[in-house]
């Protein structure tokens, strides 16, 4: 194992003499193996090791024992020790992140604080071959494209992963052979988190029935995905530059005449690039969003808009294909303005709203569709919004003349209190048009006098 | 469902008026739905339907009932009916194929016979969205690259898949709504085949724990893989033409100086192309083979060879990088010639043999490695081979002077009879060098007089 790790360290230039290496040590088997192997290697390449331990504040007494364990270890090994206590779950709640994401953010934040104190260096983390396989499987199930199957890298900025190519069996053997004691994180043994479930249930199942070497197989496959993904990226960077017309901070304008000439593979990547630049991240955006934008662009119809997540809007204006940060507001729990013709993603509810205006003779109305409704367009006052309920909301249910409290309506419909927040309500500046999935308003109903019709459809 | 299928038929031009469409009908739900939907659609686009049923000869009485069922159906619908009985398992054995592969070959062969009789047309098969997801998962577990994740196409040569975009839930609803009876293939309910296991166990598991829409997710993902894969293919066709120097039937010579300038993504594809052209297929070749060839080429060392599967050899000669069909023989159970310096894949045992000759001072011998052994190179007579046991085999076990029957050796080592066939034996023209994993021969042992050493290593 030492020879393998040393080879990787040299090949990818992970550590150089005199480097400061902050090693993240949870006390678990992976990070203990990482620490000891780096200690061995530091006898060949002279570098400095700093031990860092973050207490995530989730496993109470046990976590305190882990902290103590790593602190003692550092003392015995005579290595500098840094620790910090945080509240991961609270942080996740505040930032609207998953626990896994919050943990990652807090950990790397802490590691970088240490780097600052010690005058720079690198962060060594204990990702291994099994972690890689687990990540690939999770991403595949989520529908990632090739770029998501690249897997982790031995070196990424200031982060190094010296044992990335080592599998868990080797790690355990290494610890056993040297009688190195490691702490056991009991939550790792419960298949409550996705990653644990992949590790404890799914990978053994695949090994038994489909491929006994699945971990190795995915490792090699991710090499191929990386190679192809890098090639595509290289080409799409060139294509992007070719097609971009104006590149502002909050808006990117593409030259539509050039855009349509690109291969669809490049078109999709150009769109992703634009969103990444305008939004600062692609987090939350899925293939569905990108494909919707592509269809809008290829349709090339001026005036139609797609409201993506985080207030990012895609639209066309003659030969300008535009992706920009919208000026629309998003209040309180949530309220999002809808275009009268277009597509809007509501991140809070993970739904998509499609709107369109027709003249009456062009619509065949099907009254039985629960999530597709029709309204008298000319009765609408001001703008169109989608939001969740507010205190004091009232509306005029279809077929009635008087108004009713939305709260009472929910009670009559036996909608549990905890679900009411998640029921979308469509309004204009003054009235509720539709309590989605339940009832439309009488105010906007189609009559003999109706001239233009607004169609609204919700996709879950 | 009809509208969806009709849209696809029109969009991809699957069926035109007056077409002859041979519909493969097993009698199961998928093919029954396909047949009835095509019947509905044939009222809008006028085309001819022919029913084809292949009895695979595996499920005895039940299969005969299926045959009868489809025959009656054709009679009632007043449609031409073609059937044939084959023995799939026997065919698979003879051709060394999996049952699934054999079934596919026999089915399409039968369908094409019918096409010939009726003067051409297309074959409609009942692949659906779930089949697609199952295939993608199986391939991912096997370590396919992006090209293997493209998924099936609505149209591929003379094969059309009108219900590829429909999922199994919709198909079942369609049948139920119309009271269409379908036959149940009981083997489909047992998770004995990989595909059944994916369908019955794995997809429900993923739906429950990871992604309730996994079938749709993989469908959309495969669209993206297709788009990127096509882009890569287009570029690699151009790169291939750029690099090829000589293109014979049994040998392709690449210009090494141009090859090394290509992106690694293209290099891997060029190698795959060469193997495909020389061998007629890539079946059996994995990423490991391709990467080994790449390493050989990038190393560029004249005289080293890689013996891939099916007698395909990769080698370099100065600036010529060559992939060719070897002249080597493969006898009886199996006997494969080994190069003295190179890599050889043994398809029969799924192992890889690495050989190399050193002068004595350049080797550090580790006697404890079970699958890596050293021999006195100058004692070897003639060529080197790997094979399995033959009646009458004898060898001189290490440390002994007299010879011993290999059969007796196996008995002493308590190797079960049924395993003995799969133990590789390395020989030269006259003697056994090594019973792999068990004992080397005394004849070739390293002594004080040894000058050159042959190293042989086996990878499982």
Image: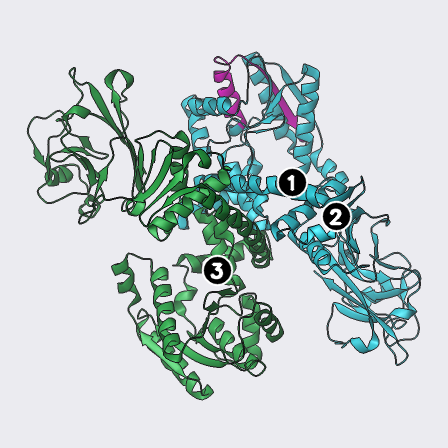
Chain colours: A green, B cyan
Q: Which residue is mark 2?
A: B254
Q: Considering only vertical position in the picture, is A143 above or below A260? A: below
Q: Nearer the viewer, residue B422 or A257?
A: A257
- Label 3, secondary structure: give it: helix
Percent coordinates x, y for residue A354 in the rendering: 30, 33
Q: Considering only vertical position in the picture, is A41 above or below A205? A: below
Percent coordinates x, y for residue B387 in the rendering: 83, 56
Quarter residue B51 falls in = top right
Chain letter of mark 3 equals: A
Specify whether B451 is left or right of B71: right
Chain letter of mark 1 equals: B
Q: Is residue A184 visible?
A: yes
Q: Which residue is mark 3?
A: A199
Pick the quarter of the image with the C terminus of chain A.
top left
Quarter residue A117 falls in = bottom left
- Label 2, secondary structure: give it: strand
Mark 2 surroundings within 10 Å by alpha-carbon count, few (fewer than 14), some (14 through 19), many (20 or more)? many
Chain letter of mark 2 equals: B
Specify whether B319 is left or right of A427: right
Answer yes or no: are tags 1 and 2 on the same subunit.
Answer: yes
How far apart are labels 1 and 2 at the CA level?
14 Å
Label placed on residue B308 = none
How far apart are labels 3 and 2 at the CA level?
44 Å
Q: Nearer the viewer, residue B171 or A118?
A: A118
Percent coordinates x, y for residue B291 in the rendering: 67, 55
Circle count: 3
Q: Which residue is mark 1?
A: B237
Mark 1 surroundings within 10 Å by alpha-carbon count, few (fewer than 14), some (14 through 19), many (20 or more)? some
Q: Start and end of the magenta stretch?
A: B31-56
Q: Quick check: is A304 in the magenta stretch?
A: no
Q: Considering only vertical position in the picture, is B223 above or below B86? A: below
């Amino acid at each position: 194992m030492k020879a393998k790790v040393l080879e990787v360290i040299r090949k990818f230039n992970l550590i150089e003499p005199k480097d400061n290496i902050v090693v993240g040590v949870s006390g678990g088997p992976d990070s203990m193996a990482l620490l000891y192997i780096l200690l061995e290697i530091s006898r060949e390449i002279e570098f400095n090791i700093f031990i860092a331990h973050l207490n995530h504040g989730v496993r109470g007494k046990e976590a305190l024992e882990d902290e103590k364990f790593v602190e003692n270890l550092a003392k015995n090994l005579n290595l500098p020790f840094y620790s910090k206590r945080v509240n991961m779950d609270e942080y996740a709640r505040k930032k609207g992140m998953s626990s896994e994401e919050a943990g990652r953010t807090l950990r790397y934040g802490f590691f970088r604080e240490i780097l600052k104190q010690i005058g720079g260096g690198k962060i060594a983390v204990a990702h291994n071959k099994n972690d890689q396989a687990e990540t690939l499987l999770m991403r595949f199930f989520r529908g990632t494209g090739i770029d998501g199957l690249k897997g982790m890298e031995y070196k990424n900025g200031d982060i190094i992963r010296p044992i990335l190519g080592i599998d868990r069996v080797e790690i355990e053997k290494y610890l056993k052979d040297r009688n190195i004691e490691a702490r056991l994180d009991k939550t790792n043994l419960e298949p409550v988190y996705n990653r644990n479930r992949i590790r404890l249930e799914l990978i053994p199942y695949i090994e038994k029935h489909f491929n006994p070497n699945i971990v190795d197989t995915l490792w090699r496959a991710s090499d191929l995905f990386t190679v192809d993904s890098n090639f595509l990226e290289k080409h799409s960077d060139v294509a992007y530059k070719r097609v971009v017309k104006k590149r502002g901070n909050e808006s990117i304008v593409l030259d539509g005449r050039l855009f349509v000439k690109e291969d669809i593979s490049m078109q999709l990547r150009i769109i992703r690039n634009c969103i990444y630049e305008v939004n600062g991240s692609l987090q939350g955006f899925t293939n569905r969003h990108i494909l919707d934008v592509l269809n809008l662009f290829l349709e090339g119809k001026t005036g139609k808009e797609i409201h993506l997540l985080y207030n990012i809007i895609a639209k066309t204006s003659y030969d300008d294909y535009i992706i920009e940060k919208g000026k629309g507001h998003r209040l309180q729990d949530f309220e999002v303005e809808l275009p009268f013709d277009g597509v809007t993603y509501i991140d809070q509810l993970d739904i998509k709203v499609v709107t369109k205006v027709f003249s009456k003779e062009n619509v065949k109305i099907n009254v039985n569709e629960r999530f597709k409704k029709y309204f008298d367009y000319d009765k609408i006052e001001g703008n169109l919004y989608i939001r969740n309920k507010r205190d004091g909301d009232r509306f005029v249910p279809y077929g009635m003349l008087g108004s009713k409290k939305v709260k009472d309506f929910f009670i009559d419909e036996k909608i549990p209190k905890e679900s009411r927040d998640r029921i979308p309500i469509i309004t204009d500046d003054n009235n509720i048009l539709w309590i989605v999935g339940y009832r439309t308003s009488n105010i906007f109903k189609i009559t003999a006098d109706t001239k233009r019709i607004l169609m609204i459809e919700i996709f879950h």
